[in-house]
Amino acid sequence: MTLQKYFLIGLPLCLISLGACAQSATGKRYSVQESKQLELQQDSLKIYAYNIVNAEEPSQRFRADSFFIRILVRSLKFPNSFYFPFDSLQTISKLYAPDSSFRIFTWQIKKDAYVFLQRGAIQMRTTDGSLKLFPLHDVSMFTKKPYDSVRTANNWIGAIYYRIIQKTFNGKNIYTLLGYDDFTINSNKKWMDVLTFNDAGQPVFGGPYFSFKNDSAKANKVPVLRFYLEYKKEATTTFNYDSSMNMIVYDHLISETDEPNRRETFVPDGDYEGFVWQNGQWLHVPKVFNSTLEEGQFPTEKKILSDDGAVNEELLKQQSDKNRKK
């Protein structure tokens, strides 16, 4: 199984035509020349994005990553680049916030069979079309407790994001990020993190947005400021948002070898847990359904990224159109 299947094609807010002036979601326009320049930049980026994932040697992957970052930043400096979808970069996740206030790029690079490094950047929408960018620096490998601290762009817990859920509480926008991490040779992780912006407009990851008050087994443990599942490499797990239930639903995991301290042995057992949004927090629900269901039976909306990491491109287009209309 290649890494490429875990990456998400972005959600474009507009499709830019080279044959005429293209209009963005806010009415701003690209000239034909600007569009051509961005397309040329994307052609170069596409080659390096592919090699980040598929090059055989680590040195080749890191070299491709370095060139990709340089060209991406140069491309984003073009006026109104925020609205250019970069939809040819199929190994890079590109997600717009539901309110189109920002988009987030994420990808990963394989150092060796044991270490994967995440990369990322947040591009803000600006009124004058200029670039406001926050590079994300992954420090996952340097912390043993990635769930217990509020973090900034400079000490980000990396993931490849496949979903953004926007909520509002007391007038503040709260964005919940769902992501994937090809964690080790034996296990994967799926992450649930919360992104907000402070008074200075800087991104903040994590916070007191998780409550386990209805779960006696977890209520008195160390506060969780972000949440993750770690599970067996070969296992297929559900971790996504069901808008009809206002709930994030995920598989309940158990050790298939009765070794609860070895998360690389964890697999779904047919039950589901979840988080429901209440009063500005994600309230943990220990058991979503009253009876055990077969995989795929619980009601859920169609997902852009399937449980095995495959991308549904038709749903991506539908979500793009929906975001553009907001």
Image (spheres, rainbow, N blue to C red):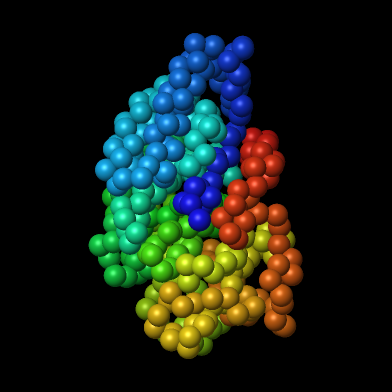
172 left or right, relative to 142? right
Residue at left offset 62%, top offset 56%? 306
Residue at left offset 51%, top offset 87%? 216
Residue at left offset 52%, top offset 28%? 84
| Residue 113 can be seen in this image | yes
Q: Position of residue 6 (x, y in %)?
A: 51, 52
| Image-quadrant location for residue 23 | top right
264 left or right, relative to 66? right
Q: Position of residue 87 (x, y in %)?
A: 55, 33
Q: Position of residue 59 (x, y in %)?
A: 27, 43
Q: Nearer the viewer, residue 177 or 253?
A: 253
| Residue 131 can be seen in this image | no
Q: Is residue 101 above or below residue 159?
A: above
Q: Is residue 177 above or below residue 249?
A: above
88 left or right, relative to 138? right
Residue at left offset 58%, top offset 59%? 308
| Image-quadrant location for residue 64 | top left
Q: Is residue 81 above or below residue 149?
A: above
Q: Position of residue 145 (x, y in %)?
A: 32, 70
Quadrant where the C terminus lies?
Answer: top right
